Amino acid sequence: MSVPRPLLFFCCLWYLCDAATGTEDFPRATNITWISVNFKTILEWQPKPTNFVYTVEISGQKTDWKKKCIYITETECDVTDQLQDVNDTYRARIISSLPTIGEIPEEPVNALSPPFTPYKQTIIGKPKIQSYQFSDDKTKLIVEIEDPMSPYRLNGSFQSIRDFLNNDLRYTLYYWKATSTGKKQKTSTTTKVEAGVDKGESYCFYVQATVPSRRENRESQESPTQCTSQTGSGGLDGYVVFIAVIIAVVLIIVIAIALSVTLYKRKKSKKQAAEKEHLPLNHA
Protein backbone atom coordinates (compact mmCIF):
# COMPACT_ATOMS: atom_id res chain seq x y z
CA MET A 1 0.00 0.00 0.00
CA SER A 2 1.54 3.34 -1.03
CA VAL A 3 1.33 6.48 1.11
CA PRO A 4 -0.37 9.43 -0.61
CA ARG A 5 2.16 12.08 -1.59
CA PRO A 6 0.35 14.97 0.21
CA LEU A 7 0.38 12.98 3.46
CA LEU A 8 4.03 12.01 3.03
CA PHE A 9 4.92 15.65 2.35
CA PHE A 10 3.06 16.78 5.51
CA CYS A 11 4.84 14.16 7.66
CA CYS A 12 8.26 15.17 6.37
CA LEU A 13 7.46 18.86 6.92
CA TRP A 14 6.33 18.15 10.51
CA TYR A 15 9.51 16.18 11.24
CA LEU A 16 11.76 18.92 9.85
CA CYS A 17 9.97 21.63 11.81
CA ASP A 18 10.12 19.56 14.97
CA ALA A 19 13.87 18.94 14.54
CA ALA A 20 14.52 22.60 13.83
CA THR A 21 12.78 23.75 16.99
CA GLY A 22 14.33 21.00 19.10
CA THR A 23 11.00 19.97 20.64
CA GLU A 24 11.58 16.21 20.46
CA ASP A 25 9.72 14.27 23.11
CA PHE A 26 12.64 13.93 25.52
CA PRO A 27 11.94 12.84 29.10
CA ARG A 28 11.42 15.71 31.49
CA ALA A 29 13.52 15.93 34.64
CA THR A 30 11.70 14.63 37.71
CA ASN A 31 12.35 14.49 41.47
CA ILE A 32 14.25 17.79 41.35
CA THR A 33 15.85 18.29 44.77
CA TRP A 34 17.99 20.98 46.37
CA ILE A 35 20.77 19.46 48.50
CA SER A 36 22.32 22.25 50.57
CA VAL A 37 24.64 22.15 53.60
CA ASN A 38 26.23 25.32 55.02
CA PHE A 39 25.19 27.15 51.81
CA LYS A 40 26.97 24.73 49.47
CA THR A 41 24.16 23.71 47.15
CA ILE A 42 23.82 20.84 44.67
CA LEU A 43 20.79 20.36 42.43
CA GLU A 44 19.82 16.72 41.79
CA TRP A 45 17.17 15.12 39.58
CA GLN A 46 16.20 12.07 37.51
CA PRO A 47 16.30 10.21 35.11
CA LYS A 48 19.77 9.46 33.74
CA PRO A 49 19.82 10.64 30.08
CA THR A 50 20.39 8.13 27.27
CA ASN A 51 20.05 9.88 23.90
CA PHE A 52 19.88 13.48 25.10
CA VAL A 53 21.53 15.97 27.50
CA TYR A 54 20.52 18.41 30.21
CA THR A 55 21.09 22.13 30.63
CA VAL A 56 20.47 23.85 33.98
CA GLU A 57 19.32 27.46 34.30
CA ILE A 58 18.97 29.40 37.55
CA SER A 59 16.82 32.44 38.26
CA GLY A 60 16.15 34.44 41.42
CA GLN A 61 13.48 36.97 42.29
CA LYS A 62 16.17 39.63 41.79
CA THR A 63 18.03 38.02 38.85
CA ASP A 64 17.27 36.78 35.33
CA TRP A 65 17.78 33.25 34.05
CA LYS A 66 21.43 32.22 33.82
CA LYS A 67 22.85 29.01 32.37
CA LYS A 68 25.00 26.97 34.74
CA CYS A 69 25.61 23.36 33.66
CA ILE A 70 25.30 23.12 29.86
CA TYR A 71 24.76 19.94 27.81
CA ILE A 72 25.62 17.56 30.65
CA THR A 73 24.91 13.85 30.94
CA GLU A 74 24.98 13.90 34.75
CA THR A 75 21.91 14.33 36.93
CA GLU A 76 23.40 16.85 39.33
CA CYS A 77 24.76 20.39 39.12
CA ASP A 78 26.67 22.48 41.67
CA VAL A 79 24.83 25.81 41.66
CA THR A 80 26.50 27.32 44.74
CA ASP A 81 28.05 30.26 42.90
CA GLN A 82 24.65 31.30 41.53
CA LEU A 83 23.08 31.62 45.00
CA GLN A 84 25.39 34.10 46.73
CA ASP A 85 22.49 36.33 47.77
CA VAL A 86 21.36 33.85 50.39
CA ASN A 87 18.17 35.81 51.15
CA ASP A 88 16.87 35.61 47.58
CA THR A 89 14.48 32.86 46.47
CA TYR A 90 15.62 30.82 43.47
CA ARG A 91 14.19 28.41 40.92
CA ALA A 92 15.99 26.05 38.58
CA ARG A 93 14.89 25.09 35.09
CA ILE A 94 16.25 21.81 33.76
CA ILE A 95 16.10 21.53 29.98
CA SER A 96 16.17 18.26 28.04
CA SER A 97 17.56 18.52 24.49
CA LEU A 98 20.07 17.33 21.92
CA PRO A 99 23.60 18.77 22.28
CA THR A 100 23.07 21.11 19.34
CA ILE A 101 25.28 24.03 18.41
CA GLY A 102 23.69 27.40 19.03
CA GLU A 103 20.88 28.61 21.23
CA ILE A 104 18.47 26.33 23.04
CA PRO A 105 15.02 26.31 21.37
CA GLU A 106 12.50 28.90 22.55
CA GLU A 107 10.13 26.24 23.86
CA PRO A 108 12.35 23.36 24.98
CA VAL A 109 11.30 20.35 27.02
CA ASN A 110 11.95 21.55 30.57
CA ALA A 111 11.02 21.06 34.19
CA LEU A 112 10.85 23.66 36.95
CA SER A 113 12.23 23.05 40.42
CA PRO A 114 10.49 23.97 43.67
CA PRO A 115 11.58 27.36 45.09
CA PHE A 116 14.66 27.48 47.30
CA THR A 117 15.81 30.18 49.74
CA PRO A 118 19.30 29.40 51.09
CA TYR A 119 18.91 31.46 54.28
CA LYS A 120 15.80 29.53 55.26
CA GLN A 121 16.55 26.09 53.87
CA THR A 122 20.26 25.23 53.83
CA ILE A 123 21.07 22.57 56.43
CA ILE A 124 23.40 23.64 59.22
CA GLY A 125 26.29 21.19 59.48
CA LYS A 126 27.30 19.38 62.66
CA PRO A 127 28.98 21.82 65.10
CA LYS A 128 32.58 21.26 66.17
CA ILE A 129 33.64 21.73 69.80
CA GLN A 130 36.91 23.67 69.65
CA SER A 131 37.80 23.48 73.34
CA TYR A 132 36.36 23.37 76.84
CA GLN A 133 37.49 24.12 80.36
CA PHE A 134 36.22 24.78 83.86
CA SER A 135 36.32 28.23 85.39
CA ASP A 136 38.91 28.95 88.09
CA ASP A 137 36.37 28.39 90.86
CA LYS A 138 35.17 25.15 89.17
CA THR A 139 31.54 26.33 89.06
CA LYS A 140 31.23 26.90 85.30
CA LEU A 141 31.82 24.72 82.25
CA ILE A 142 33.03 26.95 79.39
CA VAL A 143 32.70 25.51 75.87
CA GLU A 144 34.13 27.14 72.73
CA ILE A 145 32.49 26.20 69.40
CA GLU A 146 33.84 26.65 65.88
CA ASP A 147 31.40 28.17 63.37
CA PRO A 148 31.04 26.02 60.20
CA MET A 149 32.53 27.63 57.09
CA SER A 150 30.52 28.53 53.99
CA PRO A 151 31.84 28.09 50.41
CA TYR A 152 31.81 31.87 49.85
CA ARG A 153 34.86 34.13 50.12
CA LEU A 154 35.32 37.74 51.13
CA ASN A 155 38.69 39.39 50.43
CA GLY A 156 40.18 35.98 49.73
CA SER A 157 39.07 34.33 52.99
CA PHE A 158 36.18 31.92 53.46
CA GLN A 159 33.20 33.32 55.33
CA SER A 160 31.57 31.41 58.14
CA ILE A 161 27.84 30.74 58.17
CA ARG A 162 27.60 33.30 61.01
CA ASP A 163 28.57 36.00 58.50
CA PHE A 164 25.19 35.33 56.87
CA LEU A 165 23.01 34.21 59.79
CA ASN A 166 24.46 36.62 62.37
CA ASN A 167 22.66 36.40 65.74
CA ASP A 168 20.02 34.14 64.19
CA LEU A 169 22.59 31.36 64.64
CA ARG A 170 22.55 30.01 68.18
CA TYR A 171 24.27 27.15 69.95
CA THR A 172 22.67 25.08 72.67
CA LEU A 173 24.84 23.13 75.10
CA TYR A 174 23.22 19.98 76.49
CA TYR A 175 25.07 18.73 79.56
CA TRP A 176 24.60 16.31 82.43
CA LYS A 177 26.51 14.80 85.33
CA ALA A 178 28.51 11.72 84.30
CA THR A 179 26.70 9.78 87.03
CA SER A 180 23.24 10.98 85.96
CA THR A 181 20.93 11.04 82.91
CA GLY A 182 19.13 14.30 83.72
CA LYS A 183 20.05 16.84 81.01
CA LYS A 184 20.30 20.58 81.36
CA GLN A 185 20.77 23.10 78.57
CA LYS A 186 22.25 26.52 78.00
CA THR A 187 21.88 28.61 74.80
CA SER A 188 24.17 31.32 73.44
CA THR A 189 24.16 33.62 70.40
CA THR A 190 27.97 33.48 70.29
CA THR A 191 30.52 30.68 69.91
CA LYS A 192 31.05 30.58 73.69
CA VAL A 193 28.62 28.84 76.04
CA GLU A 194 28.99 29.03 79.82
CA ALA A 195 26.96 26.66 81.99
CA GLY A 196 26.75 26.47 85.77
CA VAL A 197 27.98 23.16 87.22
CA ASP A 198 28.45 21.59 90.63
CA LYS A 199 31.97 21.80 91.98
CA GLY A 200 33.76 18.46 92.09
CA GLU A 201 31.43 16.72 89.58
CA SER A 202 32.33 15.23 86.19
CA TYR A 203 30.14 16.08 83.18
CA CYS A 204 29.28 14.88 79.66
CA PHE A 205 27.94 17.23 76.98
CA TYR A 206 27.26 17.95 73.31
CA VAL A 207 26.21 21.02 71.31
CA GLN A 208 23.61 21.66 68.63
CA ALA A 209 23.17 24.67 66.32
CA THR A 210 19.73 26.29 65.94
CA VAL A 211 18.22 28.93 63.64
CA PRO A 212 15.06 29.98 65.57
CA SER A 213 13.53 32.06 62.74
CA ARG A 214 13.05 28.99 60.53
CA ARG A 215 10.03 26.77 60.11
CA GLU A 216 12.09 23.83 58.79
CA ASN A 217 15.70 22.69 59.19
CA ARG A 218 15.83 24.65 62.44
CA GLU A 219 18.34 22.37 64.17
CA SER A 220 21.66 20.88 63.12
CA GLN A 221 22.90 17.41 63.91
CA GLU A 222 24.36 16.93 67.39
CA SER A 223 28.11 17.19 67.88
CA PRO A 224 29.92 14.11 69.24
CA THR A 225 29.46 13.75 73.01
CA GLN A 226 32.47 14.57 75.18
CA CYS A 227 33.06 13.88 78.86
CA THR A 228 35.48 15.40 81.31
CA SER A 229 36.33 15.68 85.01
CA GLN A 230 36.69 18.83 87.10
CA THR A 231 40.44 18.77 86.37
CA GLY A 232 39.88 18.47 82.63
CA SER A 233 40.42 21.34 80.19
CA GLY A 234 41.14 22.05 76.57
CA GLY A 235 39.29 18.94 75.47
CA LEU A 236 41.52 16.50 77.44
CA ASP A 237 40.38 14.51 80.46
CA GLY A 238 42.50 15.10 83.59
CA TYR A 239 43.08 11.37 84.01
CA VAL A 240 44.44 11.12 80.47
CA VAL A 241 46.82 14.04 81.16
CA PHE A 242 48.03 12.34 84.34
CA ILE A 243 48.72 9.06 82.53
CA ALA A 244 50.56 10.93 79.75
CA VAL A 245 52.81 12.64 82.31
CA ILE A 246 53.59 9.31 84.02
CA ILE A 247 54.48 7.70 80.68
CA ALA A 248 56.76 10.63 79.79
CA VAL A 249 58.59 10.39 83.15
CA VAL A 250 59.07 6.62 82.77
CA LEU A 251 60.45 7.09 79.25
CA ILE A 252 62.94 9.70 80.47
CA ILE A 253 64.14 7.36 83.26
CA VAL A 254 64.50 4.42 80.84
CA ILE A 255 66.50 6.54 78.38
CA ALA A 256 68.77 7.83 81.19
CA ILE A 257 69.47 4.29 82.42
CA ALA A 258 70.20 3.07 78.88
CA LEU A 259 72.66 5.92 78.29
CA SER A 260 74.39 5.25 81.62
CA VAL A 261 74.81 1.55 80.84
CA THR A 262 76.15 2.32 77.37
CA LEU A 263 78.71 4.84 78.70
CA TYR A 264 79.81 2.41 81.43
CA LYS A 265 80.39 -0.40 78.94
CA ARG A 266 82.43 1.88 76.65
CA LYS A 267 84.57 3.11 79.56
CA LYS A 268 85.18 -0.47 80.72
CA SER A 269 86.18 -1.61 77.23
CA LYS A 270 88.71 1.25 76.92
CA LYS A 271 90.23 0.38 80.33
CA GLN A 272 90.67 -3.30 79.41
CA ALA A 273 92.31 -2.36 76.10
CA ALA A 274 94.79 -0.07 77.90
CA GLU A 275 95.75 -2.81 80.41
CA LYS A 276 96.47 -5.26 77.59
CA GLU A 277 98.89 -2.81 75.97
CA HIS A 278 101.05 -2.69 79.16
CA LEU A 279 101.34 -6.47 79.70
CA PRO A 280 104.98 -7.90 79.21
CA LEU A 281 105.59 -10.10 76.15
CA ASN A 282 106.10 -13.86 76.73
CA HIS A 283 109.48 -15.22 75.51
CA ALA A 284 110.03 -18.85 74.49
Image (cartoon, helix red, strand yellow):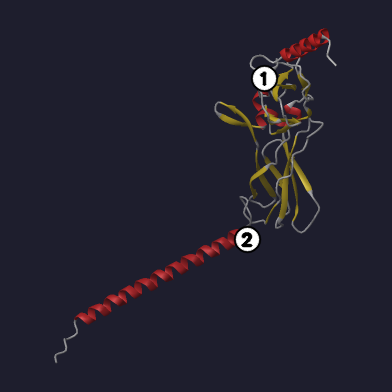
Residue closer to the observer: 91 or 175: 91
Which callout, 2 or 1, points to the residue nearer the camera? Answer: 1
Q: Is mark 2 on a helix, strand or loop?
A: helix
Please tell me whether residue 103 is drawn above or below residue 197 in the rendered image.
Answer: above
- Tell me where residue 87 sits by quadrant: top right
Q: In this view, does 274 lie to the left or right of 74?
A: left
Residue closer to the observer: 209 or 126: 126
Is the C-beta separation of discs 2 and 1 under 8 Å? no
Write the residue at 46% across / 69% down.
254
Please tell me whether residue 10 is drawn above or below residue 238 in the rendered image.
Answer: above
Residue 196 visible, this orientation: no
In the rendered image, which residue does mark 2 sit on?
A: 239
Q: Is mark 1 on a helix, strand or loop?
A: strand
Q: Percent position (x, y) of residue 174? A: 75, 46
Q: Percent position (x, y) of residue 170? A: 73, 36
Residue 10 visible, this orientation: yes
Write the residue at 79% across / 50% down.
183
Q: Which quadrant does the C terminus fall into? A: bottom left
Q: Percent position (x, y) of residue 78? A: 67, 29
Please tell me whether residue 1 is drawn above or below residue 171 in the rendered image.
Answer: above
- Tell me where residue 56 sits by quadrant: top right
Q: Percent position (x, y) of residue 107? A: 76, 14
In the rendered image, which residue does mark 1 sit on?
A: 67
Residue closer to the observer: 192 or 137: 192
Residue closer to the observer: 14 or 96: 14
User: At label 1, which amino acid type do we have?
Assistant: Lys
User: At label 2, which amino acid type do we have?
Assistant: Tyr
- Tell me where residue 232 sits by quadrant: bottom right
